[in-house]
Image: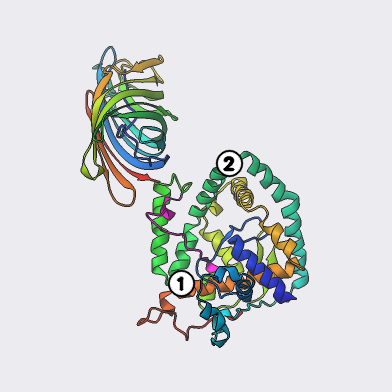
Amino acid sequence: MSSIAAAGGMFGPPQTVSREAGGLNTAVGYRYHEDSFKNNYTDYIVRQNQIYSQVSYGASSTWEIYGRIGIADLKILDAFKSADILTTTSRDHFEENWKFFGTLGAKGYFPFNRIFGIGAFIQGTYNFSNFTDDITGVQSGTPFTADLKVKNLWDVNFGIGLQATLPRGIKLYTGPYVYYTEADTYLSAAIPGLQSGTQKTLLSNQSIAGAFLGADIPLAKGFHLNIEGQYTDRFSVGSAITYTY
Amino acid sequence: MRYYVSLITLLFLLSAGSLPVPCLAEEPVQAPVETLPSEPASTDNAVDTPAQSSNQPHDVVANDDDFDYDDEPFKEEKAMIADPIEPFNRAMYQVNDKMYFWLLKPVAQGYKTVVPEPARISVKNFFSNLKYPARFVSCLLQADFTGAATETGRFAINTVWGIGGLLDPAAGRELDLQKQDTDLGQTLGVYGAGHGFYIVWPFFGPSSARDTMDILGNQVLYPLSFLNIWYASLGTKAVEAVNSTSLRIGEYESLIEAAIDPYVAMRDAYAQYRMHDIKTRKAKSLLFKDASTGNTAPEAPLPQE
């Protein structure tokens, strides 16, 4: 099993939405994430739902630092699917419910003029808890039970974004990014046909680059709506409501 | 004498913006937003500072005696409270006083030294946000549905965009959803329940028979009361008390320095302040509003102080 591509979340517009004199902005967001990964043997698809809360500090309309804490589930399709005809499992997918994760990031923005500008960001995420799921099955007529742990899941993202500011303060942005994800997996017992084996397996993503496209739309009374899509091997989409202090 | 002590106390409260109380668990009471009945001292100040009125036309000053002033706004509303267990209360006051000076204040000063003010305000916001159920229920029981909606909006916004209540974006200029300064004791007062008698509780500070129900009710409606681990519950209350005290060190000291008998000053200030709070809340209650004018109905029963 390889490359759990749990990229760390939305990137947001390159230009901070904090007040120019400097100030906080906070956000709550949801993101559906999907990506593909593989090891030396098999391709997998990963799905995550992320809910998070974010606090940012930005100033001068040019820079911002932010921290994010949230919860995410994890589903790995066909993680328990056996490649051995003598092994059958109770189900095919690895599924685990909400676990905490944290994200730190920073971004800078350079305006070309009042409309266009370019920015860059770096963002890293670490999952504080392990993801674990159990399976039962039969191997050559012998029942077995095993659990798979996904530990130390983290990622780092770096990207460049071009931004256009439209009337009413609407910001459209797009750009490329690269990312790296790593995690360790442990299967508690050696089951023929299951790829993970019993050894510690270092996982990392295969596809390292992607692109993002988003919009930041001012609402009323200091609120903003941020919608963003990301594409690597699969498509992810997220939305956040931001409040500027 | 009591009048002057009360007067000094009230002036201090108005200037400081909160009611300093030597207790461990109480949140500082917010300054009344609405105008209190004016003090006679304010008229004295006007006489003592003629420069402030130098821009007025001279004939206005010259004919000052001709005006028939309406004294009604200058009447002080005196709130009295029975104190049949004064020896016990004085003893508890001393207990709280010593607990404040010997334990709470030194700890709060140390805490203040190491924790910056914005962080302490955030902690205060967090605990205040958790007290939403008590304020919400109080508003509902007082038929202040606008207040209940405001509190609900505040709770939702501050929890979601205020990082779990650490920040208070709802009170900002754009949203302007201010905290409803109300409690269950005020609810009883709005419906005409009087103080009963004055009682000073250890840790909780000044209270009354009526407001003791508020202490009990807040235990039921305060989420942290339901922490299963006793030391977690105690710890959070200690943090809350220390944090709250750190934000108002000096207020209580100023009060007792200005008072001849701090116990009496505290008691009178408490009665006066609660009476004002209840009148303010009553003005917001739909039950006591005249449907045609929107004003508080004159026949509405006042608390028997």
Q: Indicate the chain on which mark 2 is placed.
A: B
Which region shows up in magenta? B168-185
Q: Residue at x 46, y 65 (%)?
A: B137
Q: How many marks?
A: 2
Residue picked out by circle 2: B116
**Residue B142 — which label?**
1
- Image location of residue B297, percent across then percent down: 44, 83
Residue B177 is inside the magenta segment? yes
Residue A8 in the figure: left or right of residue B48: left
User: The C terminus of chain B appears in which quarter of the rendering?
Assistant: bottom right
Residue type, mark 1 in image: Gln
- Image location of residue B123, percent across then percent down: 54, 47
Q: How is the image coloured?
A: rainbow
Tag nearer the camera, 2 or 1:
2
Q: Is residue A114 visible?
A: yes
- Image location of residue A23, percent across then percent down: 42, 41
Q: Is residue B258 above or below residue A83?
A: below
User: Quarter-wise, where is residue B81 in the image?
Assistant: bottom right
Q: Residue at x 70, y 59 (%)?
A: B254
N-terminal of the pair, mark 2 or mark 1, is 2
Asked whether the residues under the numbered discs 2 and 1 touch, taking CB atoms below 8 Å apart as contact, a structural biologist would say: no
The residue nearer to you, when weighing A71 against A96, is A71
- Mark 2–mark 1 Cα distance, whole angstroms, equals 38 Å
Residue A52 in the figure: left or right of residue B258: left
- Image location of residue A64, percent across then percent down: 39, 33
